[in-house]
Image: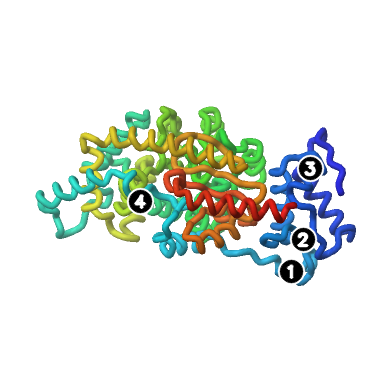
Amino acid sequence: MLTLSPELQTPLVSQIVDGLRGLIAGQVLKPGSKLPSIRAFAAAHGVSVFTVVEAYDRLVAQGWLVSRANAGFFVKRRGDEGAAPGTGAPERAVPRFDARWYLKQIFENRNLPMKPGCGWLPHDWLFGDAVKRSMRQLSSDGPELDGYGLPHGHMALRMVVAESLAEHHLAVDADQVLLTQGSSQALDLVARRLVKPGDVVLVDDPGYPNLLFMLRFAGAQVVGVPRTATGYDLPALEALLAEHQPTVFFTQPRLQSPTCSVASVAHLHRLLQLAEQHNFMLVENDIYADMDPGVRPSLASLDQLNRVIYLGSFSKTISPNLRTGFLAARRDLLDELVQLKMISGLTSSEITERITFGVVTDGRWRKHLKSLRERLAEAHRTVGRRLLNLGFELFHEPEAGMYLWARHPDLPDSAELSKEATGAGIMLGPGQLFLVEPRPTGWLRFNVAFSQDERMWRFLEQRIEMGQQVAE
């Protein structure tokens, strides 16, 4: 069908996309005609199935092809979900797998028996005993129910946070720490302070869907920086900086969601150099730091909060229900963020912050974190091995953090797969949800702590077998 040239500088994916578009535009491939299956195309042209998956995905996103469940890929007709490309008619409609869909699904499907796509840990992986002890202690001391807490948050907990950051070579005082209702409020406060309508804002791609919605709601032009297993696609980042003038880059260097990739120290240094050169701020979302068994610097520790605002959270390791997060920033910025916090909600809950303080000062807190890291590492090995045995490609194998980012050549549309999974009692994490520009994709986010149920594995095996039958 096509002649591909691996020796060219043009990537094979781009060669396939450009070649098929030319065949379709020239009517060599007629509307409605079926393309070879992914495996058949790969075998005929001597390329990997994942190269073909990526090319077909792009053509679907661009409106040249349509993907039909259990049937394959077809050249798009004028009446297929909108007009053909280039007609000036509305673009192909795609399912709304955006942040609003994500939030709705979390709360509507939280009682599904299996939740491999969720973003929290099972209750028996958390530090529930310490929470109960802290609540009993608070009750016996008599919690102060009159008045409000401090705008900055509970002083004792802020001191603990400052001491913990100092252990990781970030020198801050307690008055540079602001407690928030989880990291989500911290992100919201920072976005409202740094982002104005029309500003170009950089984010990880793939990245955090709620942040994408938050920034777009603020009127920002959101631009994705591609992630790699070692951090960032630096040539792509430098090209984006040359094209745009971003005001801020919201990023998650360590155990990033959804890829769980970790930025190397060299990438952190280069990112700080680029921020200085192009005059933009960095917001470092480090909510998975306590899950990292390695000792590594953060952007904030290398920069000492000059261009970096640092975010953390206790919700992932203690309990999502406690909603205790924090941010650290230079004093002038922190004062403005405190004012924004007071305008939007006066103070955060001192009762919740006192409970959190009791947990992190519990004598077994560090032992809990060590045990949690070991348990996550074992889950990574187990789930990663099973995914590989089923034929999945893994983006990265960190053996730390909560997630594995994976795709299978016979499961080209994770959004459709997720719809089917919901009917089987399974909450999956479709990759389209995490992309800055949503498009059909085979990538899925697996929470390793929730990926132990054999029913989930049987569901995946059955869907892979169905996909292979279609390909044949």
Q: Is residue 290 left or right of residue 136?
A: right
Q: CA distance from mark 2 to mark 3?
A: 19 Å
Mark 3: secondary structure: helix
Label 1 crowd bin: few (<14), some (14–19), many (20+), radius 10 Å: some
Q: CA distance from mark 3 to mark 4?
A: 49 Å
The residue that disc 1 covers is: 80
The residue that disc 4 covers is: 182
Label 2 crowd bin: few (<14), some (14–19), many (20+), radius 10 Å: many
Please indicate, yes or no, whether residue 178 appears anywhere in the rendered image. Answer: no
Picture mark count: 4
Towards the viewer: 187 or 278: 187
Relative height, residue 70 to residue 166 (above, below): below
Mark 4: secondary structure: helix
**Which of pointers 4 and 2 indicates the residue nearer the eye?**
2
The residue that disc 3 covers is: 43
The residue that disc 2 covers is: 74
Label 4 crowd bin: few (<14), some (14–19), many (20+), radius 10 Å: many
Q: CA distance from mark 1 to mark 3?
A: 29 Å
Q: CA distance from mark 4 to mark 2?
A: 45 Å
Q: Earlier in the sequence, mark 3 or mark 4?
A: 3
Q: Quadrant of residue 278?
A: top right
